[in-house]
Image: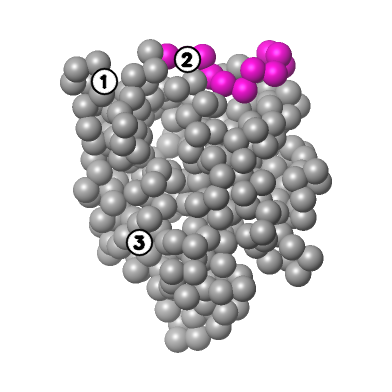
């Protein structure tokens, strides 16, 4: 990564060869090379050297029945099909004691955790050259979350990171079919692939009401951790997701300027660039540019 503070918000460009498809299942423009996460140039990039586009409260979508507390218009499958590769999921228990993804009280909207995972599993099974990350805000017991992951068939895709060892390349993760990185904010192993996210990652604050208020201060984790999460969204005066600012907040120059600020301050590009209202603005273009593609 470019950490010399010169303001360059892109990784060293590779050959730029890529598919024209976010799914990455097609051959590249060079006449047959397979892509990784949509780009041939990412295959030799280590996981901690890639900027992944992501969504905050990924499940909290109007298409699932969320309303005033929705963070997006459309749900998990649509996000994955478009190119989202890191999802922030809140898991708790609904009134019946089942694991559910809720944004605030489950009475305001919920989706069964198992149903959401089925969508993720279906995507991974049908897109063999994609690497995904889940970051849980885990209000449910890890044993129940893990049981849902296992029932969905996602445990077989889970990557286990050993502290102090280099991260594999995306190509290596794809070849090993360990294409899902699972992390949680509160809990951790066992099993070994259920990582405590703040052992691996540090993040920026996220309680902003305007772009001008955003900063790159350390929020959680340690600056020595391998991975960086930039939380890039704003709420309104009622502390609810603000769709009215989404086009401006997610605009390309705004995203790149925020990342540049964080890189200048910490010498690091983000690995996870996460937004609300992913349908608005230029999240994917920003990730491509930051990846040097």
Q: Which mark is residue 13?
A: 2
Q: Position of residue 70 (x, y in %)?
A: 56, 67
Q: Quadrant of the C terminus?
A: top left
Q: Residue furthest left?
A: 32
**In front of the other: 35 or 210:** 210
Q: Is residue 216 above or below residue 99?
A: above
Could you tell me how far apart the alpha carbons at marks 1 and 2 are, in whole angstroms? 16 Å
What colouring does the structure picture have? one colour
- Magenta stretch contains residue 242: no
| Secondary element type, mark 2 | loop
Within 10 Å of disc 2 (Cα), the crowding (few <14, some 14-19, many 20+) is: few
| Secondary element type, mark 3 | helix
Residue at screen point 67% across, 46% down: 248
Which segment did they paint magenta?
4-14
Could you tell me how far apart the alpha carbons at marks 3 and 1 are, in whole angstroms? 33 Å
Could you tell me how far apart the alpha carbons at marks 3 and 2 are, in whole angstroms? 34 Å
Badge 3 vs badge 2, beta-carbon distance below 8 Å = no
Q: Quadrant of the N terminus?
A: top right
Closest to the camera, between mark 1 and mark 2, is 1
Q: Position of residue 215 (x, y in %)?
A: 77, 40
Q: Is residue 124 above or below residue 39?
A: below
Within 10 Å of disc 1 (Cα), the crowding (few <14, some 14-19, many 20+) is: some
Q: Earlier in the sequence, mark 3 or mark 1?
A: 1
Badge 1 vs badge 2, beta-carbon distance below 8 Å = no
Residue position marked by numbered label 3 in the rendering = 117
Within 10 Å of disc 3 (Cα), the crowding (few <14, some 14-19, many 20+) is: some
Residue at screen point 80% across, 43% down: 212
**In front of the other: 213 or 282:** 282
Residue position marked by numbered label 1 in the rendering = 29
Q: Main secondary structure of the magenta part?
A: loop
């Amino acid at each position: 990564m470019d950490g010399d503070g010169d303001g360059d918000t892109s990784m060293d460009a590779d050959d730029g060869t890529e598919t024209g498809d976010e799914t990455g299942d097609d051959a590249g423009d060079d006449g047959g090379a397979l892509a990784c996460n949509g780009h041939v140039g990412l295959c030799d990039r280590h996981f901690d050297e890639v900027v992944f586009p992501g969504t905050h409260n990924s499940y909290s979508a109007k298409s699932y029945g969320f309303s005033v507390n929705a963070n997006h218009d459309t749900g998990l499958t649509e996000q994955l099909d478009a190119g989202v590769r890191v999802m922030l999921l809140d898991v708790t228990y609904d009134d019946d004691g089942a694991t559910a993804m809720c944004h605030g009280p489950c009475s305001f909207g919920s989706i069964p955790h198992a149903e959401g995972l089925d969508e993720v599993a279906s995507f991974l099974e049908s897109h063999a050259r994609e690497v995904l990350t889940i970051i849980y805000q885990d209000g449910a017991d890890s044993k129940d979350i893990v049981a849902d992951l296992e029932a969905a068939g996602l445990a077989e895709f889970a990557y286990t990171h050993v502290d102090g060892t280099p991260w594999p390349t995306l190509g290596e993760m794809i070849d090993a079919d360990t294409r899902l990185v699972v992390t949680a904010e509160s809990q951790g192993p066992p099993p070994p692939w259920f990582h405590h996210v703040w052992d691996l990652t540090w993040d920026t604050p996220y309680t902003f009401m305007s772009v001008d208020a955003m900063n790159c201060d350390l929020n959680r984790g340690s600056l020595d951790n391998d991975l960086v999460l930039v939380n890039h969204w704003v709420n309104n005066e009622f502390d609810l997701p603000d769709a009215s600012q989404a086009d401006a907040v997610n605009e390309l120059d705004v995203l790149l300027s925020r990342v540049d600020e964080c890189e200048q301050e910490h010498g690091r590009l983000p690995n996870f660039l996460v937004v609300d209202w992913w349908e608005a603005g230029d999240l994917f273009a920003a990730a491509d540019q930051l990846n040097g593609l």
